Image: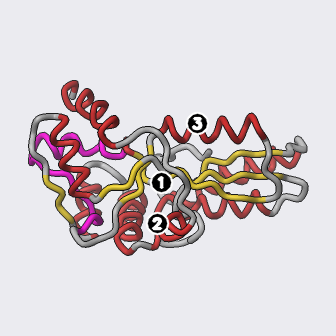
Amino acid sequence: MIPPIYQTTNWRASQNEVARNYTEAIQANNVKHVVNLSSIGAHLGNGTGPVDALYDFEQMLNSLTNLHVKHLRPSFFYYNFMAQIPLAKQASILGGNYGEPDGEKLLLVHTEDIAAAALEELTQLSFTGSSVRYIYSDERSAQEIAQVLGNAIDKPLNWVVFTDEQQKQGLLQAGLGETHAQGYADLGQSLRSGRMQADAKLHKPTPGNIKLEQFAKEFAGAFAAS
């Protein structure tokens, strides 16, 4: 996986530097099987913020001869909502530049379900060539998410849809740099348009075990501790 990189003014370039290092090491050591933690939306290549570089990494790995690679593409992490705890405390809302009432539901995933899928692929090594595995745990509307998380903290929450510019400005005010604020705004826009989830919904697998209500207990614990 490519870890988060925040000390950069060119996010994609920095991610690609890490990706090239991985690719060169895999090739130099004649590695035969790779399980790559990618992301939903990595089939697009542009317009998905930090996921754009995961498209690049997938292509780098796919270009290696004699390598069998499984690209894991998990959906929207439950844990992303932890960053909204201050908003929930101060304004009794959750929100983003996606999640309209008449929009499509979000595919959500817990890290435990990602880990289970990765373990299965790593222990079986039954994949050949280049292939993709989507991973998700639950599917909910943004307002449902706000309601379930609000119930868990005994505080009614509503989902508010921000404009792209409001999303970007909010992230800048929170201390993110330009490249990251714009990247996350782009990611939200791709969720709103349906582009990011389209291929995942076309090839939707059996959902994992951890449902939104289970994650809500973790959210409540973090809310109480903050």
Judging by the rendered image, the residue that carries numbered circle 2 is 197
Does residue 225 belong to the magenta stretch? no
Disc 1, SS:
loop
> Percent position (x, y) of residue 3?
55, 43
**Residue 124 place in picture, x, y as percent:** 76, 38
- SS for callout 3: helix
Give the Cα distance between marks 1 and 2: 8 Å
What secondary structure is found at the residue carrying circle 2? helix
Above or below, 110 relative to 12: above
Instruction: Say which of 92 and 150 sits in front.
Output: 150
Where is residue 159 drawn, in percent x and y?
A: 18, 57
Instruction: Give the mark nearer the N terminus: 1 vs 2.
Output: 1
Disc 1 target residue: 75
Relative horizontal placement of residue 207, taking residue 59 as reference (left or right): left
Residue 42: image location, x then y, percent: 57, 63
Say whether disc 3 or disc 2 marks the residue closer to the N-terminus.
Answer: 3
List the residue tagged with mark 3. Answer: 116
Q: Nearer the viewer, residue 140 or 23?
A: 140
In the rendered structure, are the residues bearing label 1 and label 2 in contact, judged by CB atoms less than 8 Å apart? yes
Q: What residue do we see at 48% from left, 38% from top?
A: 111
Q: Nearer the viewer, residue 141 or 26?
A: 141
Range drawn in magenta: 80-100
